[in-house]
Image (cartoon, rainbow, N blue to C red):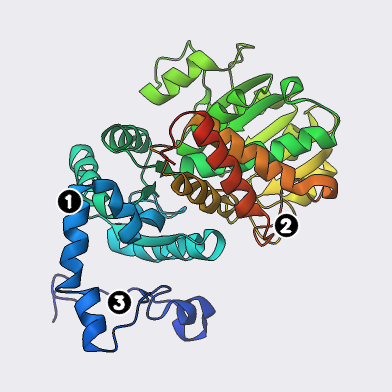
Amino acid sequence: MTSPVDTPAAAPARPAREDDPAFALHRGGKIEVVSRVPVDTREDLALAYTPGVARICTAIAEEPDLVYDYTWKSHTVAVVTDGTAVLGLGDIGAEAALPVMEGKALLFKQFGGIDAVPVCLDVTDLDELVETIVRLAPAFGGINLEDISAPRCFEVERRVQERLDIPVFHDDQHGTAIVVTAALHNAARLTGRRMSDLRVVTSGAGAAGIAVSRMLLEGGVGDLAMADSKGIVHRGRTDLNDAKRRFAEESNRAGLTGSFVDALAGADVLIGLSGGTIPREAVEAMAPDSVVFAMANPDPEVHPDVAHAAGARVVATGRSDFPNQINNVLAFPGVFAGAMRVRARRVTEGMKLAAADALAAVVGDDLSEACVIPSPFDPRVAPAVADAVARAARAEGVARL
């Protein structure tokens, strides 16, 4: 008789890949490297590689800024992850994160004309991660950090940017913040309010929650309270990490405590960035003409139909099958295109706010309950954001061109 120890484990169930169009689309990967110059003759080879390339190398060694003119650095971004917070899948590792990073590179090219290279690092130690990113940076004109777990992501971005003179941008934080700020600006305009009139409650205190909340305060909202899984973040709590503690000093001027649902009573805006379920009664308790951004995927914290029935006038989600999709692709291609056009040393808060203002302005006279943010396929989006970011970079003194 075979002992239990010798019994082979049952093979894990595998998805029906043959019938899944996502698997068909991803086979072989989604991106490739394409040559920009011909190598058809001996003369071509001599110019593209040795001996001609040596003249370029020597020129760059003598005048380092020429690297932007004679290599891909001026238009190429590294999309970097350690695979610790991939989509809603969590810590799935570097290789499993590669399809997402390929997708991000695809969107950079499609929407911003920026070349991007997925870089999935098999390292999670904070010091080693920072050092690795810094060491690979010379080949790129910008670093897009992606899917790095909080609160580590804040420290990674800060330390990498301190050591580099190219834009470093954690899209999970700042891309989301730019798009939310733009959408809320238009929602306030639609409902006849100013940003300073709004009391906002944010569910979620991870990377996106903190970045969105901080940018909304920078953008002029009247007051904002943020909640994590244990309730409202406030100065009196003793269980906050450094990022939340710093935020508690900047926010919640009303001094709210208790649960997220309690804080929604009379609030103008609900920002959902944490998943879970928000009951209809909580939305009903909000102020008239309330604004609900329920951005959990695939299931919003409150279904748009339920939110509208509960009295919300403007509803946005992270999904493409409902109006007002809060999608980071509205921000990051234009942000990098603008920053790299003027060879910015970093992406400042002013550049992010300029991106949000430009994105909001694209909606223009099309503003309605179903259109507070433009479509990702609107060809005006990336150029408008890029122009605004470039102007702001020059105004703030971080541009080299």
Work out which quarter of the rendered image holds the N terminus and state it. bottom left
On the image, the x and y values in percent for residue 186 come to: 76, 38
Name the residue that disc number 2 marks: 322
Locate residue 35 relative to residue 284 in the image: left or right: left
Q: How far apart, in angstroms, are the residues tagged by discs 2 and 1? A: 53 Å
Residue 11 is labelled as 3
On the image, the x and y values in percent for residue 227 come to: 55, 28
Amino acid on which the number 2 mark rests in the picture: Phe
Q: Residue furthest bottom?
A: 41
Query: Is residue 189 depicted above or below 234 in this figure?
Result: below
Which element is circle 2 on? loop
Q: Are marks 2 and 3 in contact (CB under 8 Å)?
A: no
Query: Is residue 326 depicted above or below 118 in this figure?
Result: above
Name the residue that disc number 1 marks: 61
Between discs 2 and 1, the one toward the N terminus: 1
Q: Residues within 10 Å of mark 1 (few under 14, many from 20)?
A: few
Q: Are marks 1 and 3 in contact (CB under 8 Å)?
A: no
Amino acid on which the number 1 mark rests in the picture: Ala
| The quadrant where residue 279 appears | top right
